[in-house]
Amino acid sequence: MDANILDPDEARVRLAAWKGRIDKLAADTQTMSDRLKEVRVTASDPNGLAEVTVDSTGGLVDIRFNDRMLRSTPGAMAQAVMAALTAAKEQIADRSQEIIADTVGTESAAARAIADSVDRQLRGAPVTQPDPGSPGDDEEYDVRSDLWKR
């Protein structure tokens, strides 16, 4: 008899072990998904003008401004919002990576693919902060559409 052929009892043991690993992976993946859905982060811009809250996908769910916004230009406020949003998305990405590592680990190709996907979705190009001494860029803003500028 060929030594490579498993006997039925050994095949059942291997199959049960494989099923156990698959069941654990499915449960861990569901736990990861549930925990990721619950994550929300609030962050502010460096100057404290805007505070945003984002959900696990990086979607904006709340925004707040302090009283200094009344003395700020629209351009400065827009930059404050974008800076706060970028900071919040970075924090969500970091927290998501922790949840992924805690639940499904970092060893499997699937876990790495999930982690890479989260990073691509949440980590964007950094928002540059204006020089506080420079005038706002609102004066140079052209409200005409690109079609009219040609």
Image: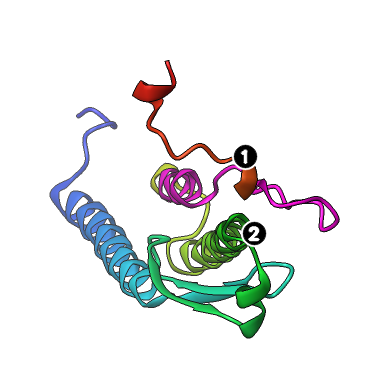
17 to the left or right of 44: left
Tell me if residue 11 is in the magenta stretch. no
**Magenta part of the chain:** 111-137
* Foreground pick, 6 / 67: 67
The residue sitting at 67% across, 79% down in the picture is 68
122 to the left or right of 129: left
> Is 144 situated above or below 119?
above
Q: Could you give the CA–CA distance between mark 2 and mark 1, rounded to whole angstroms?
A: 13 Å
Q: For the residue labelled by badge 2, is the local secondary structure a helix, a strand or a loop?
A: helix
Q: Please state the horizontal and vertical placement of residue 50, each as a whole percent of the image.
A: 59, 72
The residue sitting at 24% across, 64% down in the picture is 23
Dot 1 crowding, Cα within 10 Å, few <14, some 14–19, many 20+: few
> Is 150 situated above or below 6?
above
Q: Please state the horizontal and vertical placement of residue 36, each as a whole percent of the image.
A: 39, 69
> Is 61 situated above or below 74?
below
Residue 140 is tagged as 1
Q: Please state the horizontal and vertical placement of residue 65, each as a whole percent of the image.
A: 55, 78
Q: Nearer the viewer, mark 2 or mark 1?
A: 1
Dot 2 crowding, Cα within 10 Å, few <14, some 14–19, many 20+: many
Tag 1: amino acid = Glu
Residue 76 is tagged as 2
Q: Quadrant of the N terminus?
A: top left
